[in-house]
Image: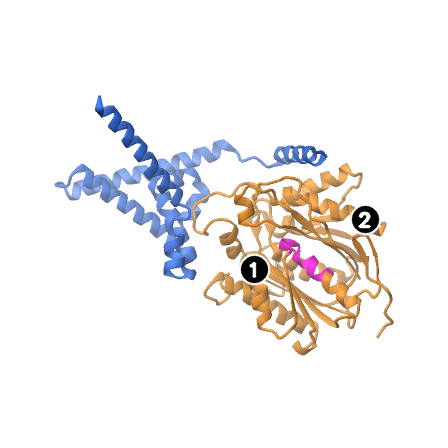
Amino acid sequence: MEDKKRNEAYNKYVSAKIPKTRPWPSLFNSFWVGGLICLIGQGINDIYLLIFPNISQQTGWSLTLITLIFIASFLTGIGVYDQIGKFAGGGSIVPITGFSNSITSPSIEFKSEGIIYGICVKMFTIAGPVIVFGVASSMVVGLIYWIISLF
Amino acid sequence: MQKRQNTFKIKQTIKLKNQPKIIGSYAIVGPKEGQGNFGPYFDYVMKNDHFGEKTFEKAERKMLESAVTGVIQNAHLQPKDIDLMIAGDLLNQIISSSYAARAFQFPFIGLYGACSTMAESLAIGAVLVDGGFYQNVVCCTGSHFSTAERQYRFPLELGNQRPPTSQWTVTGAGASVVSLEGEGPKITAVTFGKVVDWGVNDVNNMGGAMAPAARDTMLSHFRNTRTKPDDYDLIVTGDLGKLGSEILIDLMEDEGITLGTNYGDCGQMYFKREQETLCGASGAGCCATVFNSYIIQKINEGQYKKVLFLPTGALLSTTSTQQGDTIPCVCHAIVVEK
């Protein structure tokens, strides 16, 4: 009982002592880097539509996403993306480039354990939950959409 | 050979009557560590973290092997003179130590004391040598930033931010030879620590988790040896880091013991500010490399006469963390005198 009290008091003391991150510079950096990534994405989309005027908007978006994923993957491979991430935090994690980074980085890391048990098994260790929640939530939304469409 | 006396024990502390000596020490580190504050004191700085191997695990193993080879040379011994090797590391099933021991035909004791392994191995080695059971014992430990990151945290290339309390695992290995014959600093007392857990479960705040363990061992040690901080020229903890060492000073202050300017923490002092390691260095290699380079050299030069070396270790695993357990920690102390 006494131990519990001591531990509570100690944890309280430690959390008061922990150095705090300054929120405003972090938020500012993630805001402008995240915005810049989106701007680049829009630019790529416009260029695709300019080069191939006959493709649909949908196809343009797909091509843009593929290009962004490739760029992020490539930057991860040459060791640049983690530097961007260190600087921008959420700004480079939230866009699709962050998702690409979260799949590429464990693939590189676990290459030493072989293709099957290394790359393939570990590829989704970080992105896995995102995919699970993506699929699960889209099912829920689909169900709601179906129920609404009945009336 | 000097006449052997009976070593006696006061609770946790063992006073070593025959005073085994550290007749050789060796420290090998990675390039980032070589640029840190202790850079000039290390025996060898690797050109890159791979150390000519395909994987980081193999590099860590090779680091331990070269530390053992190096320390035997520094002690002016031959491999055939070594009677026992005591080693440990941070990887699952302490593979680096066991695989390194495979390269030598020494009897081998594998330890897991996390970051406290250097003191743990030296303490066990000193006791065995003091008792006359072995002549020359190699004590060795190491860690590698990339293998530790991969086992405990995230892939290296993942673009995430480190919390301000996090520490940087040292790439490096240190080794000592303990013997009754030869010249070197003497180990006069050892205190084996209890496992202490004050309910911290934040894996990014190891300093906060480990400080109570350091407090516990330090208090027992001072009580058992009837000493106080001023009796030592240097009191040095392992890898509490900036936050952890501040917490320890506060905790000791609560007990009425003031840690003054003769107290330092290897983790806090290891890197320069511009190396962006937040709360400092950590890992088994952190205190092992500092102890086997800077501290031993300064004792030999006569700058320090009596040093209390007490690194702490966090005895957690990724499984215990994921199951929400708190972090049990341990701290072992040794006294090294000129």
Give the spatial CA distance, label 1 vs label 2.
34 Å
Determine if the magenta segment contains residue B122. Answer: yes
Residue B222 numbered mark, or none? 2
Highlighted range, magenta? B113-123
Q: Secondary structure at mark 2?
A: helix
User: Where does residue A48 sit, x and y in percent of width and height?
Assistant: 20, 43
Label 2 is found on which chain of the structure? Answer: B
Query: Chief secondary structure of the magenta span?
Result: helix
Q: Which chain is orange?
A: B
Where is mark 1, residue-wise? Answer: B93
Q: Nearer the viewer, mark 1 or mark 2?
A: 1
Q: Crowding at label 1, few (<14), some or many (≥20) Cα neighbours within 10 Å? A: few
The residue under label 1 is which amino acid type? Gln
The single residue placed furthest to the top in the displayed view is A151
Question: Observer-nearest residue: A97 or B275?
Answer: A97
Q: Secondary structure at mark 1?
A: helix
Q: Which chain is blue?
A: A
Tell me which numbered mark, 1 or 2, is placed earlier along the sequence.
Answer: 1
User: To which quarter of the image does residue B284 belong?
Assistant: bottom right
